[in-house]
Amino acid sequence: MNKEIIEGKWNQLKGSVQTQWGKLTDDEIDKIEGDATKLCGLLQERYGKSKEAAEAEIEAWQLRHNR
């Protein structure tokens, strides 16, 4: 799923983001606005992940929602 698709479907995907990464607040998810870079930064902050690990999780999540 490319960046434009994520941004375009963000309202539909927010619930999935909350399920996948429950430490993120609703306000944080709203502020991400479908931006994978913002999501990556928040995952690093909230979960103490490396940038590479956060990017890998996001990529795996995107593949599951590539419909």
Image (cartoon, helix red, strand yellow):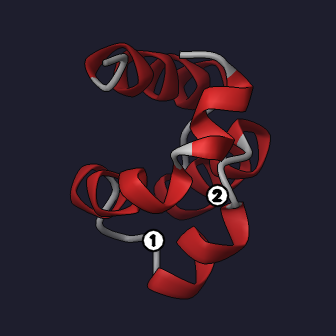
Looking at numbered disc 2 in the image, what kind of residue is underneath it? Leu
Residue 15, compared with residue 57, is above or below; it is below
Relative to the observer, which residue lies in front, 1 or 50? Answer: 1
Residue 42 is labelled as 2
Residue 44, compared with residue 52, is above or below; it is below
Residue drawn where x is 34% and y is 56% of the image: 21
Image quadrant in which you'd find residue 27: bottom right
Figure label count: 2
Query: Does 26 sit left or right of 27 as displayed?
Result: left
Quadrant occupied by the C terminus: top left
Residue 6, compared with residue 1, is above or below; it is below
Relative to the observer, which residue lies in front, 48 or 10? Answer: 10
Determine contact: label 2, label 1, CB under 8 Å: yes
Residue 44, compared with residue 22, is above or below; it is above
Query: Does 23 sit left or right of 52 as displayed?
Result: left
List x then y, in percent, for residue 8: 63, 43
Q: Earlier in the sequence, mark 2 or mark 1?
A: 1
Residue drawn where x is 71% and y is 73% of the image: 31
List x then y, in percent, for residue 60: 37, 17
Image quadrant in which you'd find residue 50: top right
Is the residue marked by circle 2 packed among few (<14), some (14-19), or many (20+) residues within 10 Å? many
Looking at numbered disc 1 in the image, what kind of residue is underneath it? Leu
* Secondary structure found at label 2: helix
Is the residue marked by circle 1 packed among few (<14), some (14-19), or many (20+) residues within 10 Å? some
How far separated are the C-alphas under marks 2 and 1?
A: 8 Å
List x then y, in percent, for residue 22: 29, 66
Residue drawn where x is 75% and y is 51% of the image: 38
In the image as oriented, which residue stretches furthest toward the bottom?
A: 27
* Residue behind mark 1: 24
